Amino acid sequence: MKSGSALTPKVILELRQVCKDFHTRQGRLHVLDKVSLRVRRGDFLCLLGPAGCGKSTLFHICAGLEEPDSGQVLIDSQPVAGPGPDRGVVFQDGALFPWLTVRGNVEFGLTMQNVPAGERRERCDEALELVRLRKFADVNIHQLSAGMRQRAAIARAVVLQPKVLLMDEPFAALDAQTRNIMQEELQRIWAQTGTAVVFVTSNVSEAVRLGDRVAVMSFRPGRIKREVPVHRSRPRLADDPHLMEIRTFLVRDLKEDAHLAVEEELGDA
Ligand SMILES: Nc1ncnc2c1ncn2[C@@H]1O[C@H](COP(=O)(O)OP(=O)(O)OP(=O)(O)O)[C@@H](O)[C@H]1O
Ligand SMILES: [Mg+2]
C-alpha cells in the first residue's frame, strides 16, 4: 500500500535518524544511533530493550524533555521543540504531584492551558471515568495504591487528548497481578480513546501482549534492530499460545544484548 493512501493512517510521531551521546566520567556514551521510527494514528507500538539500552532516553526525546544531538523528531509533521499537550506522558513511578488530589493532578495540564473551570471539570470527570477512578477524585495521592496511582497518571495524560500517549515502563513497579490487570485496562483505554501509544518496556511478555508492533532495541549503541508485528485480536490473554511463540523468539533475540548490558553493569565488558 502506498504511503499517504486514504487507507493508511496518518503518521503522528516520526523519528528520523536520531542520535544521542552522553558525556560521563568514563567517557563518551553513544546511547542512540540513528534511530528511526514511525507511529501512525491508532498504533500501539512497544519499544522493547534490555536495561540501559537507551529506552528512557528515546522516550525523553519523544516527550521533548531531552534534545537529540542529531536527527529529527516530528509530531504531526512539525518538529518537536519541547514538551507539549500533543504528547501525554506516563512515567514508571507515576510522577504525580503528591500535594494535589487526584482531580488536582488530572486538571493540572488543563489549568496550564487556561481551559475554563467548567470544561476542566467535565474533561477531568471523563478521564477519571475512563480509568475507573471517578469515586476517588478528591482523594490525596498518598491514599492510593500503586495501581491506582498509575490509573491517575494515565488519566492525567489522556485528559489532554494527546495525539500520542508515551509510556515509560508504567507497570514495572507493580506486583504481577496488578500489572496483569493494568495491561488489560490499558488495552481497553486504548480501544476507547483511539490514541496512538508508544509503550516502553523491558518485559517481553508485556511487549507482545500489548503491542501491534514490537520495536526491538539493541544495547550500546541503541538501535532499532527489528520491528516484529503482532497480529492478534484483543483483548489478548497473557497465555495466548501465538503470543508465546513470538515471546520465545524475542527472548532469544534479546538474550545477547541483555548479557552485554549485565557485563557492562558489572564492569567486565
Ligand atoms: N543524563 C545522563 N547523563 C549521563 N548518562 C546518562 C544520562 N541518562 C542516561 N544515561 C546513561 O545512558 C544509558 C541509557 O540510559 P536509559 O535510561 O535511556 O536506558 P533504559 O533503556 O531506559 O534503561 P532502564 O532499563 O534501566 O530504564 C545508560 O547507560 C545510562 O546510565
Ligand atoms: Mg528506562
Image (cartoon, rainbow, N blue to C red):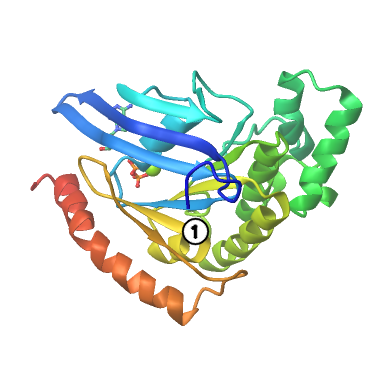
The image shows residue 243, relative to residue 133, as above or below, that is below
Give me the residue at 25% from left, 26% from top. Answer: 22
Type of amino acid under label 1 = Gly
Image position of 117 (left or right of 29) = right
Ligand 2 quadrant in view: top left
Q: Position of residue 75 (x, y in %)?
A: 53, 30
The image shows residue 121, relative to residue 117, as above or below, that is below
Give me the residue at 75% from left, 26% from top. Answer: 110
Image position of 63 (left or right of 9) = left
Q: Where is residue 233 in the image (x, y as percent from the top left)?
A: 58, 71
Q: Is residue 47 visible to us here?
A: yes
The residue most toward the right is: 118
Where residue 227 sits, quadrant-wise, is bottom left
The residue most toward the bottom is: 241
Give me the residue at 14% from left, 51% from top. Answer: 263
State yes or no: Cβ of the residue under disc 1 lies below 8 Å from any atom of ligand 1.
Answer: no
Q: Position of residue 7 (x, y in %)?
A: 59, 51
Q: Can you identify the residue that label 1 sits on?
A: 211
Q: Is residue 92 visible to us here?
A: no
The image shows residue 245, relative to residue 81, as above or below, that is below
The residue most toward the left is: 268
Q: Position of residue 149 (x, y in %)?
A: 64, 47
Numbered circles on residues, count: 1
Question: Please, what secondary structure does the residue beneath circle 1 have?
Answer: loop
Image position of 44 (left or right of 228) = right
Q: How crowded is mark 1: few (under 14 residues within 10 Å), some or many (20 or more)?
A: many
